[in-house]
Image (spheres, grey):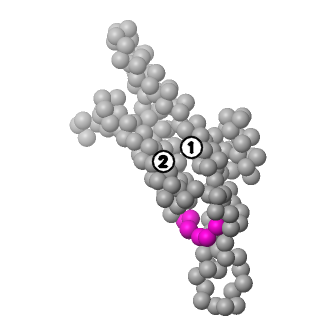
């Protein structure tokens, strides 16, 4: 799985990278739920695993998640910045058709960024909420829980900020809805 995530990164396919990360996270959640259920049983007959021994959330996995998420929206954000800069350029103030095309491009890019940010937010939130903290067989394989929680909360905050940037301001999606 790690090989496929790494390969997707090298060929610049963030959608595939996120898909493989999703599969990895699914296995990680399954593993932690299994260990958690074995540890919560009051039965002495429960002979399942008591510690997580595979599908750790390593620093490499965290880096892959950050990279994939950034790659997924960065081209759109760059396109949006260029379109807004061109729209503000006085050269285009006399050309109505070019300004209309720029406004249309700005709105489409903003809508797509918001949709992708919501997808990333849900992806991170799903894993963050489902994952259980269980004893680890190899303590050094995974960062401490407070670091993982801080990372996931920070990532969710970043993508909420990107959504806010698309909605606010003069060129924002809500800025043009003054009469609504």
**Residue drawn at the location 72% of the way across and 42% of the way down:** 6
The foreground one among 150 and 10 is: 150
Report x, y in % for residue 31. 67, 68
Report x, y in % for residue 29. 62, 65
**Residue drawn at the location 40% of the way across and 19% of the way down:** 85
Residue named by callout 1? 66
- Structural distance between the alpha carbons of marks 2 and 1: 8 Å
**Residue drawn at the location 23% of the way across and 37% of the way down:** 179
Q: Dot 1: what SS?
A: helix
Q: Is residue 124 above or below residue 113?
A: below
Q: Is residue 26 magenta?
A: no
The foreground one among 32 and 112 is: 32
Q: Are marks 2 and 1 in contact (CB under 8 Å)?
A: yes
First to last magenta residue range: 130-136
Q: Is residue 51 above or below residue 1?
A: below
**Residue drawn at the location 67% of the way across and 34% of the way down:** 12
- Please give left or right for residue 111 compared with residue 132 in the image: left
Q: What main secondary structure does the magenta stretch of the protein show? A: loop
Q: Is residue 161 above or below residue 133?
A: above
Extreme bottom residue here? Answer: 44
The foreground one among 92 and 141 is: 141
Res 178 quadrant in image: top left
Residue named by callout 2? 155
Q: Earlier in the sequence, mark 2 or mark 1?
A: 1
Res 8 quadrant in image: top right
Extreme left residue here? Answer: 179
Report x, y in % for residue 77. 48, 31
Q: Is residue 131 magenta?
A: yes
């Amino acid at each position: 799985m790690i090989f496929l995530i790494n390969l997707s990164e090298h060929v610049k396919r963030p959608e595939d990278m996120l898909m493989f990360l999703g599969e990895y996270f699914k296995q990680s959640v399954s593993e932690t739920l299994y260990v958690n259920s074995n540890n919560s049983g009051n039965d002495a007959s429960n002979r399942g695993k008591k510690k997580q021994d595979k599908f750790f959330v390593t620093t490499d996995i965290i880096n892959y998640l950050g990279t994939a998420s950034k790659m997924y929206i960065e081209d759109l954000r760059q396109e949006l910045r260029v379109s807004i800069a061109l729209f503000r350029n006085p050269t285009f103030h006399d050309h109505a058709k070019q300004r209309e095309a720029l406004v249309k491009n700005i709105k489409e890019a903003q809508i797509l960024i918001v949709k992708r940010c919501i997808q990333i937010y849900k992806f991170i939130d799903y894993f963050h909420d489902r994952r259980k903290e269980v004893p680890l067989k190899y303590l050094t394989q995974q960062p401490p829980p407070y670091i993982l929680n801080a990372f996931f909360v920070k990532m969710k905050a970043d993508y909420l900020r990107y959504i806010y940037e698309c909605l606010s301001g003069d060129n924002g999606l809500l800025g043009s809805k003054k009469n609504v």
